[in-house]
Amino acid sequence: MTPDYRLIVVTVPDLRPDLDFLDAARAAEAGGATAFQIRWKAASAGALLRITERLLRAVEPPVYVNDRVDVARAAGADGVHLGANDLDPGRVGAATSGSIRVGFSVGSEGEAAAARTGKAHYWSLGPFNRTRSKADAGPALGEQGFRRLADLAPAGLPVIAIGGIGAGDVRRVVEAGARGVAVISAVSGASDVERATREIRDELDACIR
Protein backbone atom coordinates (compact mmCIF):
# COMPACT_ATOMS: atom_id res chain seq x y z
CA MET A 1 0.00 0.00 0.00
CA THR A 2 1.28 3.47 -0.92
CA PRO A 3 2.18 5.48 2.20
CA ASP A 4 -0.09 8.44 2.91
CA TYR A 5 1.98 11.46 3.92
CA ARG A 6 -0.80 14.04 3.73
CA LEU A 7 -0.88 14.80 7.44
CA ILE A 8 2.03 13.80 9.66
CA VAL A 9 1.46 14.73 13.28
CA VAL A 10 4.76 15.21 15.12
CA THR A 11 4.21 14.07 18.69
CA VAL A 12 6.39 15.33 21.53
CA PRO A 13 5.66 13.35 24.72
CA ASP A 14 6.80 16.06 27.13
CA LEU A 15 5.30 19.02 25.25
CA ARG A 16 2.07 19.30 27.27
CA PRO A 17 2.04 18.15 30.89
CA ASP A 18 -1.70 18.88 30.97
CA LEU A 19 -2.51 16.48 28.13
CA ASP A 20 -1.88 12.73 28.08
CA PHE A 21 0.41 11.93 25.17
CA LEU A 22 -1.52 8.89 23.98
CA ASP A 23 -4.91 10.57 24.38
CA ALA A 24 -3.67 13.37 22.15
CA ALA A 25 -2.42 10.89 19.55
CA ARG A 26 -5.77 9.08 19.52
CA ALA A 27 -7.56 12.40 19.10
CA ALA A 28 -5.28 13.32 16.19
CA GLU A 29 -5.99 9.95 14.59
CA ALA A 30 -9.72 10.55 14.95
CA GLY A 31 -9.22 13.94 13.29
CA GLY A 32 -7.54 12.45 10.24
CA ALA A 33 -3.80 12.16 10.90
CA THR A 34 -2.28 9.83 8.30
CA ALA A 35 1.03 9.24 10.10
CA PHE A 36 2.86 10.08 13.32
CA GLN A 37 6.44 11.08 13.99
CA ILE A 38 7.62 10.75 17.57
CA ARG A 39 10.19 13.36 18.61
CA TRP A 40 11.67 13.24 22.10
CA LYS A 41 15.19 14.66 22.06
CA ALA A 42 15.80 14.43 25.80
CA ALA A 43 14.80 10.78 26.19
CA SER A 44 17.18 7.88 26.65
CA ALA A 45 17.05 5.11 24.07
CA GLY A 46 15.18 2.91 26.54
CA ALA A 47 12.55 5.54 27.36
CA LEU A 48 12.05 6.36 23.69
CA LEU A 49 11.68 2.68 22.86
CA ARG A 50 9.03 2.14 25.53
CA ILE A 51 6.94 5.11 24.54
CA THR A 52 7.24 4.27 20.84
CA GLU A 53 5.91 0.81 21.56
CA ARG A 54 2.99 2.34 23.47
CA LEU A 55 2.22 4.67 20.58
CA LEU A 56 2.33 1.80 18.10
CA ARG A 57 -0.25 -0.06 20.17
CA ALA A 58 -2.46 3.02 20.54
CA VAL A 59 -2.85 4.17 16.91
CA GLU A 60 -3.32 2.63 13.48
CA PRO A 61 -1.44 5.08 11.19
CA PRO A 62 2.28 4.50 10.60
CA VAL A 63 4.71 5.67 13.28
CA TYR A 64 8.12 7.17 12.46
CA VAL A 65 10.84 7.66 15.08
CA ASN A 66 12.83 10.87 14.94
CA ASP A 67 16.64 10.47 14.73
CA ARG A 68 17.00 6.92 16.12
CA VAL A 69 17.28 4.10 13.59
CA ASP A 70 18.08 1.64 16.39
CA VAL A 71 14.94 2.50 18.35
CA ALA A 72 12.76 2.40 15.23
CA ARG A 73 14.00 -1.09 14.40
CA ALA A 74 13.75 -2.38 17.97
CA ALA A 75 10.19 -1.08 18.38
CA GLY A 76 9.01 -2.37 15.02
CA ALA A 77 8.13 1.16 13.92
CA ASP A 78 7.13 1.83 10.35
CA GLY A 79 9.93 4.27 9.71
CA VAL A 80 12.58 6.70 10.89
CA HIS A 81 12.93 10.41 10.25
CA LEU A 82 16.47 11.78 10.02
CA GLY A 83 17.76 15.33 10.26
CA ALA A 84 20.76 16.88 8.59
CA ASN A 85 23.00 16.07 11.59
CA ASP A 86 21.90 12.46 11.93
CA LEU A 87 23.10 9.39 10.05
CA ASP A 88 24.78 10.06 6.69
CA PRO A 89 22.01 9.63 4.07
CA GLY A 90 24.30 7.47 1.95
CA ARG A 91 24.56 4.92 4.79
CA VAL A 92 20.92 4.76 5.73
CA GLY A 93 20.17 1.80 3.50
CA ALA A 94 22.74 -0.37 5.24
CA ALA A 95 21.54 0.70 8.68
CA THR A 96 17.88 0.00 7.99
CA SER A 97 18.39 -3.04 5.73
CA GLY A 98 15.52 -1.65 3.68
CA SER A 99 13.06 -2.86 6.29
CA ILE A 100 11.67 0.53 7.31
CA ARG A 101 10.72 3.73 5.50
CA VAL A 102 12.99 6.74 5.74
CA GLY A 103 12.28 10.45 5.71
CA PHE A 104 14.91 13.19 5.49
CA SER A 105 14.72 16.77 6.75
CA VAL A 106 15.91 19.25 4.12
CA GLY A 107 16.26 22.97 4.72
CA SER A 108 18.91 24.09 2.24
CA GLU A 109 20.39 23.25 -1.14
CA GLY A 110 23.38 21.63 0.58
CA GLU A 111 21.11 19.39 2.62
CA ALA A 112 19.17 18.52 -0.53
CA ALA A 113 22.40 17.45 -2.24
CA ALA A 114 23.29 15.25 0.74
CA ALA A 115 19.80 13.77 0.88
CA ARG A 116 19.98 12.78 -2.76
CA THR A 117 22.83 10.38 -1.91
CA GLY A 118 20.48 8.26 0.18
CA LYS A 119 17.30 6.37 -0.53
CA ALA A 120 14.38 8.20 1.05
CA HIS A 121 10.64 7.65 0.92
CA TYR A 122 9.92 11.35 1.44
CA TRP A 123 11.60 14.66 2.17
CA SER A 124 10.37 17.07 4.84
CA LEU A 125 11.18 20.62 3.73
CA GLY A 126 11.21 23.53 6.13
CA PRO A 127 10.68 25.57 8.00
CA PHE A 128 7.99 26.89 5.68
CA ASN A 129 7.06 29.60 8.20
CA ARG A 130 8.88 30.81 11.28
CA THR A 131 8.46 28.32 14.10
CA ARG A 132 9.15 28.12 17.81
CA SER A 133 8.68 24.34 17.97
CA LYS A 134 12.24 23.60 16.83
CA ALA A 135 15.00 25.74 18.29
CA ASP A 136 17.56 24.97 15.58
CA ALA A 137 15.25 25.51 12.62
CA GLY A 138 16.69 27.78 9.97
CA PRO A 139 15.08 30.85 8.39
CA ALA A 140 11.62 30.47 6.89
CA LEU A 141 11.60 29.23 3.30
CA GLY A 142 8.26 30.69 2.24
CA GLU A 143 6.69 29.65 -1.05
CA GLN A 144 9.67 30.46 -3.26
CA GLY A 145 12.26 28.77 -1.06
CA PHE A 146 10.09 25.72 -0.63
CA ARG A 147 9.50 25.40 -4.36
CA ARG A 148 13.23 25.75 -5.05
CA LEU A 149 14.06 22.85 -2.71
CA ALA A 150 11.12 20.76 -3.88
CA ASP A 151 12.49 20.99 -7.42
CA LEU A 152 15.72 19.35 -6.19
CA ALA A 153 13.97 16.23 -4.91
CA PRO A 154 14.23 13.03 -6.98
CA ALA A 155 11.43 12.65 -9.48
CA GLY A 156 8.26 11.32 -7.91
CA LEU A 157 9.48 11.67 -4.32
CA PRO A 158 6.82 13.18 -2.02
CA VAL A 159 7.88 16.44 -0.37
CA ILE A 160 6.24 17.43 2.90
CA ALA A 161 6.07 20.94 4.34
CA ILE A 162 6.90 21.58 7.99
CA GLY A 163 7.34 24.66 10.14
CA GLY A 164 4.61 26.81 11.66
CA ILE A 165 1.90 25.40 9.40
CA GLY A 166 -1.80 25.67 10.23
CA ALA A 167 -5.00 25.08 8.32
CA GLY A 168 -4.76 28.53 6.74
CA ASP A 169 -1.39 27.70 5.18
CA VAL A 170 -2.36 24.47 3.46
CA ARG A 171 -3.32 25.90 0.08
CA ARG A 172 -0.08 27.89 -0.11
CA VAL A 173 2.13 24.91 0.68
CA VAL A 174 0.33 22.65 -1.79
CA GLU A 175 0.62 25.28 -4.52
CA ALA A 176 4.35 25.44 -3.73
CA GLY A 177 4.66 21.70 -4.43
CA ALA A 178 3.94 19.95 -1.14
CA ARG A 179 2.16 16.62 -1.11
CA GLY A 180 1.43 16.88 2.59
CA VAL A 181 2.28 18.68 5.81
CA ALA A 182 3.89 17.81 9.13
CA VAL A 183 2.55 19.73 12.11
CA ILE A 184 3.43 20.12 15.76
CA SER A 185 1.95 23.12 17.58
CA ALA A 186 -1.08 23.48 15.30
CA VAL A 187 -2.31 20.13 16.61
CA SER A 188 -0.44 19.31 19.81
CA GLY A 189 -0.87 22.83 21.16
CA ALA A 190 -4.58 23.05 20.38
CA SER A 191 -7.24 22.98 23.07
CA ASP A 192 -9.22 20.54 20.90
CA VAL A 193 -6.71 18.25 19.21
CA GLU A 194 -9.23 16.30 17.15
CA ARG A 195 -10.90 19.43 15.80
CA ALA A 196 -7.57 21.09 14.96
CA THR A 197 -6.44 17.98 13.10
CA ARG A 198 -9.72 17.74 11.23
CA GLU A 199 -9.49 21.36 10.06
CA ILE A 200 -6.06 20.75 8.55
CA ARG A 201 -7.08 17.41 7.03
CA ASP A 202 -10.17 18.95 5.43
CA GLU A 203 -8.03 21.63 3.82
CA LEU A 204 -5.58 19.03 2.56
CA ASP A 205 -8.33 16.89 1.09
CA ALA A 206 -9.71 19.94 -0.72
CA CYS A 207 -6.30 20.79 -2.20
CA ILE A 208 -4.71 17.42 -2.92
CA ARG A 209 -6.39 15.15 -5.44
Image: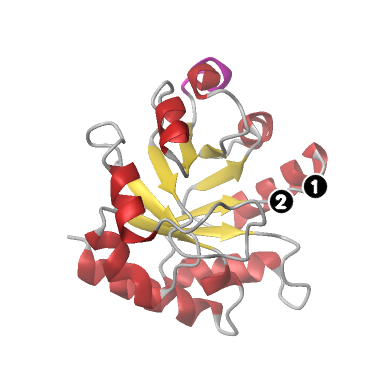
Residue designated by label 1: 43
Residue under label 2? 40
Secondary element at image label 2: loop
Q: Magenta includes 82? A: no
Rendered residue at 30%/55% (across/down): 144
Tell me where the magenta segment starts and ends, as one range. Answer: 93-98
**153 relative to 175 in the view: left or right:** right
Q: Amino acid at mark 1?
A: Ala
Residue 61 visible at all: yes
Q: Residues within 10 Å of mark 1 (few under 14, many from 20)?
A: few
Measuring 51% from the left and 38% from the top, which residue is drawn there? 79
Amino acid bearing label 2: Trp
Q: Secondary structure at mark 1?
A: loop
- Is 48 positioned to the left or the right of 149 in the image? right
> In this rendering, is residue 169 above or below 159?
below
Residue at x 65%, y 51% (from the top left corner) = 136
- Quadrant position of the C terminus in the picture: bottom left
